[in-house]
Amino acid sequence: MVTIEEALQIITDQKVKPKNEIRNLSACAGFSLSEAISAPFDMPSFDNSAMDGYALCGISKEYHIVGEVAAGDTGQFKLKEGEAVRIFTGAKVPKNTTAVMMQEKTRVTGNKLFLEQEPKKGQSIRKKGEELKKKQVVFEKGYTITPAGIGMIGSLGIDKVEVFKKPVINLITTGNELVKPGKPKLEGQIYESNSYALAAACENYGFTCMDKIQIEDDLEVIKTGITASLETADVLILSGGISVGDYDFVKQALEENGVEEQFYKVFQKPGKPLYFGRKEDKFVFALPGNPASSLSCFYIYVLPLLFQLSGSKKAGLERYSFSVSHDYGNRSNRPSFLKAKITNGKVEILNGQGSSMIQSMALGNALVFLEAETPVKKGDTVECFLIS
C-alpha cells in the first residue's frame, strides 16, 4: 500500500512519449501545442484606426476633408498639414497621420471638418507591432489551445497547427450484478453507471473514451477483454473487480496480460483498492466499483496522467484553499477526499460521503482533502480540488 503522495509521484515519474499530429485550426481546441508558435509578421502589420472617425494631419480644430479610407483598402493616401480623411475601424491610416478623432467629436460642413476638442498626437491609432513583433513567441510549447487561442492563431494566417495527440482511452466495467440503464432490473441487480460517469468526466476535460465494454465477473472473459482493449488503447480504465473478493479477478487478469504493477492500494478514503499498471507504453488504471470512489480516483489520479500524455502543462485538478462554512467532525482513520460544494467563497462538506453515494458528488463541485482524524471548525481553511 502507498500513500497518496507516493501514488501521485509514481504517476508523475512515468516516462511518456506524447505523439504529434497536425490538425486543422478549426479542430484543435483543447489540444496542446507540440511546438511553439511565433508571429510571422508584426501585429498589427500596419498602423490602423482604432475607431470610425477621421484621420488627421497636424494639430488643429479645423481640417480639409480630402477622401475616405475603408477597412481593407490597399491604396496609399498621403496627407498634408491641415488635411483629413474619413476613416473606419481597422483601416490603414494614411502617411503623415497625426491622430484619429472619433466621429462623435466632429462636425462636417461640406468638405470642412470641425473638431469639438484638440486631438492628441497618436490618439486612436493602433501602431504596427503594438501587440506582437515579428518572430515574437505567441504561444509556448504545451499551451492548451482555447477559443481565443484559435482566434489568435488564425489572425496570424496559420490554418494548420502541430499539436500533441490525445491518448486513446478504453473503458471496461465488470460485474455480474450490472444492468444497462433502460433495461429491466431484477432483485439483486443494479444499474451500471460508472462507464457513463467516467466517459463524461473524460469528455469534460477534452478526452474521449473510444471503446466502452461491460463484462461479467469471469477471469477468462476479463482477460480476453483486457487483451483486446490494450491493442488499441493508450490508457485502459477498468471499474470494479479490483478488491479482494472471490469474484474480483481484474488484478490477476492484468498480471496474466503482462501488465506491470506500479502500485496497488492507496492509503485513502474513498478508493483504497486502486491499481495502476503499465505495459510498455500503455497504462492501466483499475478503479474501485463504487461510483463515488471510481469518480474520485479518476479525478485525482487518472486525469494527471491524461494531461501528461497529451503534452499539456496541466498537472490535474486546480487546487484552492477555502474556509469551511460549518464544523465537520472528521473521524476517518485515513486521509479523505470529501464531496463538497463551494458557494460564495465558502466550502460546505456535504452529507452522503459513502463510497457508493454519488448524488452528493453530483450536487457538489469540489473535493475537500482532509488528513486522517482531523476535524475542522467553521472558518478553518481546507484544500479543495475543483471538479466543476
Image (cartoon, rainbow, N blue to C red):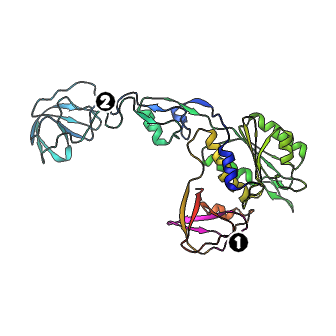
Q: Position of residue 224 (x, y in %)?
A: 86, 39
Q: Residue at x 14, y 34 (%)?
A: 57
Tell me where residue 124 sits by quadrant.
Answer: top left
Q: Is residue 298 visible?
A: no
Tell me where residue 342 sits by quadrant.
Answer: bottom right
User: Which of the two discs, 2 and 1, sits closer to the camera?
Assistant: 1
2 vs 296, nearest the viewer = 2
Q: Which residues are the magenta region?
A: 328-351
Separation of marks 2 and 1 at Cα, in angstroms: 69 Å
366 vs 140, nearest the viewer = 140
**Which residue lies under the disc numbered 1?**
331
Q: Position of residue 237 (x, y in %)?
A: 74, 46
**Which residue lies under the disc numbered 2?**
72
Q: Is residue 202 above or below residue 153?
A: below
Tell me where residue 156 sits by quadrant.
Answer: top left
Q: Is residue 150 above or below residue 336?
A: above
Q: Position of residue 32 (x, y in %)?
A: 55, 38
Q: Is residue 87 magenta?
A: no
Q: Residues within 10 Å of mark 1 (few under 14, many from 20)?
A: few
Q: Is residue 151 above or below residue 381?
A: above
Asked if the residues shown at circle 2 and circle 1 are in contact, with their CB atoms under 8 angstroms apart, the answer is no
